Amino acid sequence: MIVKYGGNAMKSLELRRAVASEIAAVRRELPVVVVHGGGPVIERELSARQIPSEFRGGLRVTSPEAMDVVEMALCQLNKQLSQDVGQAVGLMGRDCELLRAEVLDPALGRVGRVTAVNADLLRTLLGAGLTPVVGCIAVGLDGEALNINADTAAGAVAGALNEGIIFLTDVDGVYRSFPDPESRALVLRRAEVEAGISEGWIAGGMIPKVRAALDALERGAPFATIASGMHSGVLAAAVRGEAGTRILP
Ligand SMILES: Nc1ncnc2c1ncn2[C@@H]1O[C@H](COP(=O)(O)OP(=O)(O)O)[C@@H](O)[C@H]1O
Ligand SMILES: CC(=O)N[C@@H](CCC(=O)OP(=O)(O)O)C(=O)O
């Protein structure tokens, strides 16, 4: 299965290591591909260099100058995560054209839309007993880097491998009345997701997650769940269908 691990659930070294050991435990039962983001790390590196960055529709407008910093920050995080997970190979989407993309909208700068995933490379690594840890940078038609939202990248990988996906984030799932965790939906169908977005109770960073979940399901992924990476045991429980919000087609 695919585990998407986002920046908001990796804010401390302890948290990152705890999630890594959960991933290491789960993969004894089920081979895992990790796809990661790193929004807060990117944010820190951009502001240290006084490079402005703004979000439009949940996507970071990425100038060529910002792209260099995004790539540098995610590459470093990729090595840290691979080391934490162990028996892992850290890759960016540019390696072996693992993720190919085209410019999504010139107004967003170097932001990409994934057009192809090198699933054979992932299967080769999994076949050798290794865990691929993938950073969300793709190679564009011009051979240069494109910035991909990590949820979108993970959904594309799940769709290409036809495997289930769990998005680990900083909330227990999708709440019908954010931020009340008691209002967590156990399951959400496409129509409810679309209603949630238009009514505004699914917002911000949750939008690319539910959209990526639906995209993965549409391409043949058997399940897609959004769950918390903040508490121990949640990943294994989510695999059993006992935690988080399961998105259904
Ligand atoms: N209905 C909702 N239920 C839960 N979280 C929501 C909802 N709508 C918006 N959110 C926001 O989505 C955030 C998770 O997305 P994001 O910050 O992008 O996480 P990550 O870094 O893990 O990708 C939550 O922290 C919350 O602020
Ligand atoms: C295009 C775009 O918005 N890319 C994201 C990539 C990182 C990401 O998605 O990280 P999280 O999973 O932590 O949110 C960005 O630059 O922040």
Image: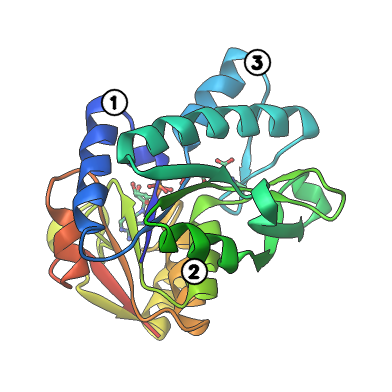
Query: Which of the 4 image quadrants contains residue 86?
Result: top left
Q: Is residue 218 left or right of residue 72?
A: left
* Disc on the earlier residue, 3 or 2: 3
* Quadrant assignment for the C terminus: bottom left
Identity of the amino acid at label 1?
Answer: Leu
| Disc 3 target residue | 50
Q: In the image, is residue 13 above or below residue 165?
A: above
Name the side, left or right, on which 22 lies relative to 219.
left
The picture places residue 78, in percent across and down from the top left corner, at 48, 36
The x, y position of residue 44, in whole percent, is: 51, 22
Observer-nearest of 96 and 238: 96
Which residue is depicted at the point 15% across and 45% down?
Answer: 231
Label 1 sits on residue: 13
Disc 2 marks a residue whose amino acid type is Arg
Discs 3, 2 touching: Cβ within 8 Å: no
The amino acid marked with disc number 3 is Gln
Structural distance between the alpha carbons of marks 3 and 2: 32 Å
Q: Position of residue 93 (x, y in %)?
A: 62, 50
The residues tagged by marks 1 and 3 sit, at their Cα atoms, a distance apart of 25 Å
Give the residue at mark 2: 211
Which color scheme does this rendered protein use? rainbow
Q: Quadrant of the N terminus?
A: bottom left
Residue farthest right in this picture: 142
Q: Earlier in the sequence, mark 2 or mark 1?
A: 1
Q: Is residue 131 left or right of residue 48?
A: left
- The kind of secondary structure element at disc 3 is loop
Q: Relative to the observer, which residue lies in front, 204 or 243?
A: 243
